Image: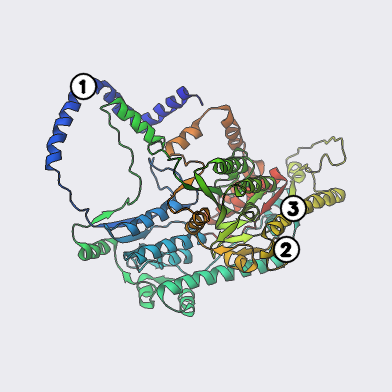
Amino acid sequence: MSSARKWMKLAVVMSAVGLAAPFLSGAARAQDKPHDEAAKAKGAEVKKDEKKVEPPKARIAVFRLAAAVKETPTEEIFNFGGETGTPLWTLVERLDKAAADPAVKAVVVLLDGATIGAAQVGELRQAFDRVKAAGKELIGHTDTISSLGQYTLLSGAGRVSAVPTADVWATGLYGETPYLRGLLEKLGVKPDFLTCGDYKSAAEIFMREGPSKEAEAMQNWLLDSLYDTQVARIAASRKVSPELVKAWIDSGPHSAEKAKELGMLDAVEHRQDLEARLKKSYGDDVVFDRKYGKKAEPRLDASSPFGILKFWGELLGASKPVDKKKAAIGVVYVDGPIVLNASSSAELFQEQSAASTEIRKALNEAAADDAIKAVVLRVDSPGGSALASEIILDATRRVKAKKPFTVSMGNVAGSGGYYVACGADTVFADDATITGSIGVVGGKLATGGMYDKIGVKFKASRRGQNAGMLSSGDVFTQAERIKMQSWMDEIYGVFKGHVTAIRGGKLKKPIDDLAGGRVYTGKQALALGLVDRLGTLHDAVKFAADAAKITEYDVRVVPRPKSALERLLDQSAGDDDRKGLDVAAAARPFLISQALPLVQALDPAHAAVVIDALGRLELVRREGVVLMAPELGLGR
């Protein structure tokens, strides 16, 4: 987009949010600036003599978690309204700032329905521990607890309370995996998928009406490990036995009053009562800082064109330029399903995708930047395109050749997510991370029957024995199936070869006993040698800094996170490089268009899982062969 067009877009946006009028009035008053400045200068001299330095008031830092905790940071310096997700790293930074701030006497975490992954819970609990270790009171408070994961997070506070009659649904772990074979048959579609590995169950949701014995066994060992992790965390925080925690879970759900009687909560109180208690402890003049650690939103000084330019710069995220000379740890995110290009899959998933073209560029930038002394790759992805995964892995090798390179796994780093991670010097995972799934899935949808239902016929013509191999007219012939399996076996061999070549003697079993599509938690993966350490993103960054032998450093996200306004301008841009995205969004895949009326009638939780599964299916159609972890249906 040209500069002129970009500023025109900005003017339209500013007008829409009510900023144009102050801008115009400010420009009109610019001629009065000399008089205004003289008056301000005179007043400033008087105030300078009178000003006295006062100690900062005691503060209570309040953190409200009301939306999804995201992985990739964004510059949220201007909010256009509504609940926005909080980036995990930003949230941890703010908690650490509160821990180190002598003016902060206590920290309150208000849980208002936030969606938080199991590995993210582990990261936040460690940040809670640092707050408590700094001698600060840490209170967790909520109106309701809707999952075991939410209670696991809150239990990490020093004091946990809920409002009277609140529901405490810490009743265990529950997941549903959707099986779409019946839906596809109703549409007249025949799924035809092949896999490498008996446990590579990602395609079972399309091919079967229920799990295979291998998939069910894997689901059970994953649930056992995840459940034990949650129970152990709660037991450690509440200073009780794991057996008692399991008794709490099995006897639930509970009211807040019953939960307090059992020892799950420390208090039952309304928020006003909690506030009154804190004022009694820390003084009536204590400040409740509900935006603690957040960047101040930009203010418009309409008295000067320079003030307006400064305001625009802040809106565009340019108010605090990066010190590119200071030593830094670079953090690059692989967040979402792995695809070749973001524009080619924008409509497939409800979440963002991880485009290899963009991640390769970011890793190359981090490798070439002399100020970045080490790089951490944060992976939160179920996998995706085999080709895109190979591109990212190659880019990590180029980083590793120049500087220390570490991986931090988030909630999931499965299949392609593990593929891009395995090349690191050191791999960190949380106890509850879902990882592994070393295997390959490939296939197609045969839609001939669907078109028969509406009276549409196609006449195929071909030159070349395998020209129509991926045609959607019919399932594979026997010869095509053999060819397809051979191709997938080759990719599977490359995948296993990467893991054995890179991790070598770290593996505790032969690769074929670890691969085959088997999925593990981070705790299980550590025991098998698939990862190196249990820890958080915070731990991985510190480890990378130690490897680079630096103690003073910035943490720099690569590429620089864009502000809300920059993202809005990108989305509304009319450049040629965006047209492909606009067309793709308009032309939603036919299968998804046909299925949406059915899934919209379902409850929201089921609908989200089914739509995500359909997105995975469409990704396989586009990519041909994918490295995708199975849909476990556990939610968050």
The secondary structure type at the circle numbered 2 is: helix
Residue 565 - label: none
Judge left or right: residue 318 versus residue 270. right
Q: Residue 423 in the image: x percent, y percent?
A: 64, 54
Q: Earlier in the sequence, mark 3 or mark 2?
A: 3
Say few, some or many: other residues with alpha carbon within 10 Å of mark 1 (under 14 / 14 to 19 / 20 or more). few
Say few, some or many: other residues with alpha carbon within 10 Å of mark 3 (under 14 / 14 to 19 / 20 or more). few
Q: Residue at x 51, y 43 (%)?
A: 558
Q: Amino acid at mark 3?
A: Val
Image height of 150 relative to 4, above or below: below
- Residue at which label 2 appears: 511
Q: Amino acid at mark 2?
A: Ile
Judge left or right: residue 195 versus residue 433. right
On the question of residue 564 being in view, the answer is: yes
On the question of residue 618 being in view, the answer is: no
Viewer-side residue, 363 vs 310: 363
Q: Earlier in the sequence, mark 1 or mark 3?
A: 1
Image height of 631 relative to 326, above or below: below
Residue 494 - label: 3
Judge left or right: residue 376 versus residue 80. right
Extreme front residue here? 549
Image height of 274 relative to 236, above or below: above
The secondary structure type at the circle numbered 1 is: helix
In contact (CB < 8 Å): disc 2 and disc 1? no
Q: Residue at x 73, y 44 (%)?
A: 450
The secondary structure type at the circle numbered 3 is: helix
- Residue at which label 1 appears: 32
Q: Amino acid at mark 1?
A: Asp
